[in-house]
Image (cartoon, helix red, strand yellow):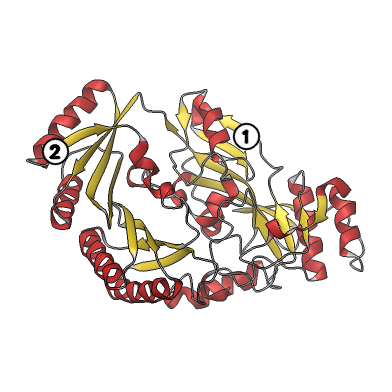
Amino acid sequence: MIANMDSGSQRIPSVARPERGFHDIVGENNFRAAIPEDSVASVQPRYVVEPRTEKELAAVLRHANEVGLAVIPRGRGTKLEWGNPPSRADLILSVARLDKVLEHAWADLTVTVEAGCTIQKLQDALAQHGQRLALDPLWPEKATVGGVLSTNDSGALRLRFGALRDLIIGVTLALPDGTLASSGGKVVKNVAGYDLPKLATGALGSLGVITRAVFRLHPLPRNARTFSLSTASLEEMQLLILAFQDSKLAHTSLQTKVGADSPPVIDILFEGTETGISAQETHLRKIGGHVPVVESPETPWNARQNLWHSSDASAISKISVLPAGIGKTIQAIQREANSRQLHWKVVMQATGIGWLRLDGPSESLHASLLQLRSELDRDAGSLMLLHRPAAFPSINVWGRPGDALPLMRAVKQQFDPRNTLNPGRFVGGI
């Protein structure tokens, strides 16, 4: 069920002067004029507000909604460029001060945490009881819980533990009318009522501002070892990935890396006891046959994050394909990039979710991405643009929304009828 925790009980000042209203809610020290560094996709906001509590945040949002200001929720800003440029941006609503781990019910394997808490801070707190949130997003030392949920960012651990929607069991949202709405609970088996946690995950803050979340947890592994296999061709790489997935290997993560100047490499992670991992290694070598297997440090799992290194002249995209089509997709990327003399790198998970970096002139990048998106669409895949150079031609970063767009618009209208939150940034310009 959805629980209405609060509907803006704090008095909202007169709408005649929005600045004075924000001062009265959060105090002058937590309100300031925006500076160029606060811009969102080159759109400059007017104000930045940093509430200290959920109720202050809800009151700020209600005030902004009443005076007609467009609100951009922000954590630490690591993924603020994802999505379309906003059609309007008046107020940056920061959750950075809402950064507490509220309750770690270690016996129940659950945690309640505020949206401004960084993933690394959360993991450090959980590790004291030998537990973790089985999630590996980009830039965990800076990325916040709310930002990771809003962008639905997960990495290679998704293969074993599922996506964010499988890990979140409760959420509290501040809605534009000032309501603090909660759904879900603190128990892993809670499935009753409207599934607001899953609805908010990946919505890019377009429905409400996440203020806290409840997650299911997993024990920290006793040991972890990564092995890498260098393959001779994309065909061999694809066959090995499918063979590993169809085997009795109990791997935690499985990815492949390949680029214009690097051959295909498969990385596989095993977690558990030393005896168990040694048995897995023996089975891995048997399946790999003649392909050399070497033990690697943990650095292969930074490959996705490394795509953003010196990315000013590059385009970085998230792609999704059927697992059986990973090799075919990489061949298409290679063919398209070579035809336009672009440098390329790909990191693909065995789930079929991957990340592509292309480097070269903006016009060539634009043409290649449109061509690759067209090919992926035909094969039931997708391409979403996450990063682009400053002088990049106009493009729909999300791709085709499909038949779900009317329903998505209806949900947006129900939650945010005045189009206050992140206007224009989500799928279909929502």
| Image position of 385 (left or right of 6) | left
Question: Which of the two labelled residues, at mark 2 and mark 1, occupies the earlier sequence position?
Answer: 1
The residue wearing badge 2 is 292
Q: Which mark is residue 268?
A: none
Secondary element type, mark 2:
loop
In this view of the protein, which residue sits in the foreground, 41 or 184? 41
Contact check, label 2 and label 1, Cβ < 8 Å: no
| Image position of 116 (left or right of 333) | right
Quarter of the figure that contains the C terminus: bottom right
| Image position of 50 (left or right of 107) | right
The image shows residue 45, relative to residue 210, as above or below, that is below
Dot 1, crowdedness within 10 Å: few (<14), some or many (≥20)?
many
The residue wearing badge 1 is 101
Q: Amino acid at mark 1?
A: Val
User: x, y percentage for residue 129?
Assistant: 50, 23
**Looking at the image, which residue is at 26% across and 21% down?**
274
Q: Amino acid at mark 2?
A: Pro
Quadrant in which residue 356 is drawn: bottom left
The image shows residue 105, relative to residue 384, as above or below, that is above
Whether residue 386 appears in this view of the structure is yes
User: x, y percentage for residue 353?
Assistant: 34, 57
